[in-house]
Image (cartoon, helix red, strand yellow):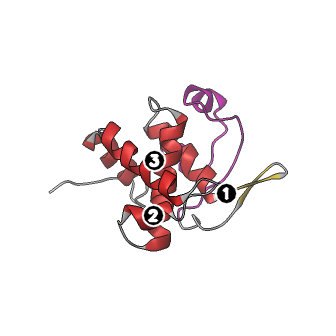
Amino acid sequence: MRRALLYATKDSNLLKKYGVASYDWVFERSSLTSTHVLGNYPMTQTTILNNILKLHFAHWHLSRIKCLSYLIMGLFQVKTVNLTEIATTFPGRAEIDSNYRRLQRFFQQIEFNSAVIAQLVVAFLPYTTYTLA
């Protein structure tokens, strides 16, 4: 069910269950950098990533999901794991120091479940069957 959102979904019950607004959209694996359209409103890369993360981290508060989304997008932009540099990529009017402290608090307060992270990574792989060796 989680992979269905990566392609296209019309299942409003699934979307409502995970707190995602009811809409239809197509997400191609290779198009994270393009902008998708939701009715008359542009759907940014961060919005798409937020919606995908909501499916895998349904028990998280939206602010934490957004922070993780900004973190992932920042990693691709600055190509380093330095939190100070990642903090410069956060959207909004907050100061860089505030974003840096936000990232610090995020890592202090969140415990990642390795099984959920593995499911998230596998959801992005182009294969339908997997063999663990």
Residue 7 covered by magenta stretch: yes
Q: Which circle marks residue 86 in the picture?
A: 2
**In front here: 46 or 1?**
46
**In front here: 75 or 12?**
75
Q: Nearer the viewer, mark 2 or mark 3?
A: 3
Residues at circles 2 and 3 in contact by the CB criterion of under 8 Å: no
- Above or below for 95 versus 111: below
Q: Which circle marks residue 102 in the picture?
A: 3
The amino acid marked with disc number 3 is Arg
Q: Identify which residue is drawn at 38% across, 43% down.
A: 105
Q: Identify which residue is drawn at 65% across, 54% down.
A: 26
Quadrant the C terminus occupies:
bottom left
Residues at circles 1 and 2 in contact by the CB criterion of under 8 Å: no
The amino acid marked with disc number 1 is Thr
Of mark 2 and mark 3, the one earlier in the sequence is 2
Which stretch appears magenta?
1-29
Q: Secondary structure at mark 1?
A: loop
Q: Secondary structure at mark 2?
A: helix
Residues at circles 3 and 1 in contact by the CB criterion of under 8 Å: no
Q: Identify which residue is drawn at 34% across, 37% down.
A: 109
The amino acid marked with disc number 2 is Ile
Q: Which residue is mark 1?
A: 44
x and y, in percent, of residue 91 in the image: 61, 57
The image quadrant of residue 56 is top left
Of mark 1 and mark 2, the one earlier in the sequence is 1
x and y, in percent, of residue 68 in the image: 46, 49
Q: Give me the C-alpha separation between circle 3 and circle 1.
A: 22 Å
Q: Secondary structure at mark 3?
A: helix
